[in-house]
Image: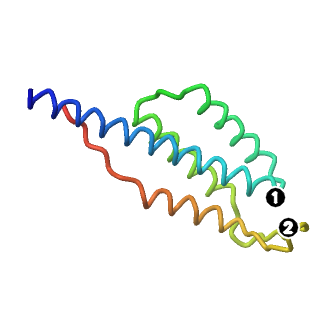
Amino acid sequence: MVADAEKFKAEDEMNILKVEKKNSLDQIIYSGLSSSKKDTNPELLNYLQETQDWLQNHQDEDIHIYEEKLKEVSEKIQSMSVSTDTNTDTNTGNVDTDADIVDQVNDINDDQVDIQEID
């Protein structure tokens, strides 16, 4: 009975981590889409929309798949963002920089937990 409880606890922890990874990926896509629409970067916008579609169609992937996709998206955003470009939102007057999205990506990556497989 104790062994079963430990097994279920480990499974629950893995499910929690999977949801956290999926949510992190969703957050990074959303942030990137918001930023790329302001920056009118069609290549990045298209990539992020494709990734968002992928995520919607892959709701039950392995944690490692989400980690790889998160890393891929982070690298793509960083490679396509130029930290010296700035844009002003004409509706609010707020200045947004490409560095903001890179900082958000780095914050998400810093918050990630290393996952260890439990047999």
Quarter that holds the C terminus: top left
Quarter that holds the N terminus: top left
Residue farthest right in this picture: 90
Residue farthest left in this picture: 2
x, y percent for residue 44:
73, 47
Q: Residues within 10 Å of mark 2 (few under 14, many from 20)?
A: few
Q: Disc 2 designates what residue? A: 89
Q: Is residue 19 left or right of residue 86?
A: left
Q: CA distance from mark 1 to mark 2?
A: 7 Å
Q: Is residue 48 left or right of residue 41?
A: left
Task: Determine the residue positioned at 59% across, 51% down.
Answer: 28
* Among the two numbered marks 1 and 2 on one chain, the one whose residue lies closer to the N terminus: 1
x, y percent for residue 81:
69, 60
| Nearer the observer, 33 or 74 | 33
Residue farthest front in this picture: 1
Q: Is residue 106 left or right of residue 112?
A: right
Q: Is residue 71 above or below residue 65?
A: below
Q: Disc 1 designates what residue? A: 38
Task: Determine the residue positioned at 81% across, 58% down.
Answer: 38
The amino acid marked with disc number 1 is Lys
The amino acid marked with disc number 2 is Asp
Label 1 residue SS: helix
Task: Determine the residue positioned at 52% across, 62% down.
Answer: 106
Q: Are marks 1 and 2 in contact (CB under 8 Å)?
A: yes
Q: Is residue 110 above or below residue 13?
A: below
Residue 30 is marked as: none
Q: Quadrant of residue 110?
A: bottom left
Q: Residues within 10 Å of mark 1 (few under 14, many from 20)?
A: some
